[in-house]
Amino acid sequence: MEYINLFVKSIFVDNMIFAYFLGMCSYLAVSKNVKTANGLGLAVIFVLLFTLPINWVLNTYVLQPGALKWLGPQFADVDLSFLSFIVFIAVIAAFVQIVEMVVEKYLPSLYASLGIFLPLIAVNCSILGGSLFMQQRDFPNLGEPVVYALGSGIGWYLAIVCLAAIREKMSYSNVPAPLKGIGITFITVGLMGMAFMIFMGIQL
């Protein structure tokens, strides 16, 4: 039940886009059509699902104060938490590189559509934010980071695909000239954020 609660909350209540506004640059830039948004959303899920549990292991057994006591009592006072940002980003960048190579080899059309925003997943603040929230929440076991990563990734995927579908429909709408493009997109994102606020009352 605890895992279900964490999974649902990470998708709807603690949505990376609508609750924390993380990853907005790629969210707005790649949400012009559903196909491209779908590809980037799946890539974000993959990167989160692998990097967040790895970063949890590194944080628990290497980085946090006293984490190295398993090496011996002389290491019990070692604190490597100041390396958290560097280590987390290094892990994320490694997996983003793997995703980029796979997409380039097997899905060249999607690779061309995503352009610079695929490698920029490495600096996507929603990916790093997931690891930092994991560190802040101090999950007690490996299962919770995995569930949180999957839920956060699905939440980001849901947000970008929904926006892409709306933007595709809006291309056939009579939008006032001053609001065309990014203007109407900002308004739409704001309305979607307000809609997602209804999930804040969920109690599981």
Image (cartoon, helix red, strand yellow):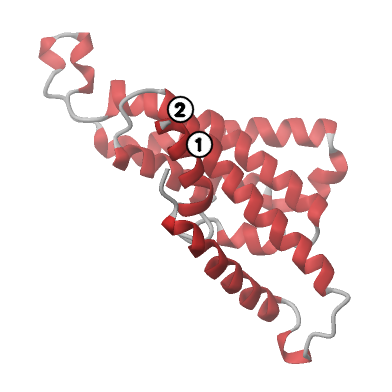
Could you tell me residue 4's position as x and y percent?
48, 34
Could you tell me residue 47's position as x and y percent?
58, 35
| Placement of 195 over or under 103, stated as above or below | below
Q: Residue at x 43, y 47 (%)?
A: 129
Could you tell me residue 201's position as x and y percent?
42, 57
Query: What residue type is disc 2 on?
Result: Pro
Q: Which residue is drawn at 16% across and 8% down?
A: 72
In this picture, residue 145 sits left or right of residue 189: left
Q: What element carries label 2?
A: helix
Mark whose residue sits in front, 2 or 1: 1
Q: Which residue is drawn at 88% across and 75% down?
A: 172
Q: Identify the residue under disc 1.
A: 149
Query: What residue type is disc 1 on?
Result: Ala
Task: Please identify the quarter of the rendering in which residue 165 is found.
Answer: bottom right
Near-viewer residue (143 or 125): 143
Q: How far apart are marks 2 and 1 (CA)?
A: 8 Å
Mark 2 Cα shell of 10 Å, populated few (<14), some (14-19), many (≥20): many
Instruction: Compare marks 2 and 1 and give the one earlier in the sequence.
Output: 2
Near-viewer residue (129 or 82): 129
Number of disc labels: 2
In this picture, residue 76 sits left or right of residue 195: left
Q: Identify the residue under disc 2.
A: 53
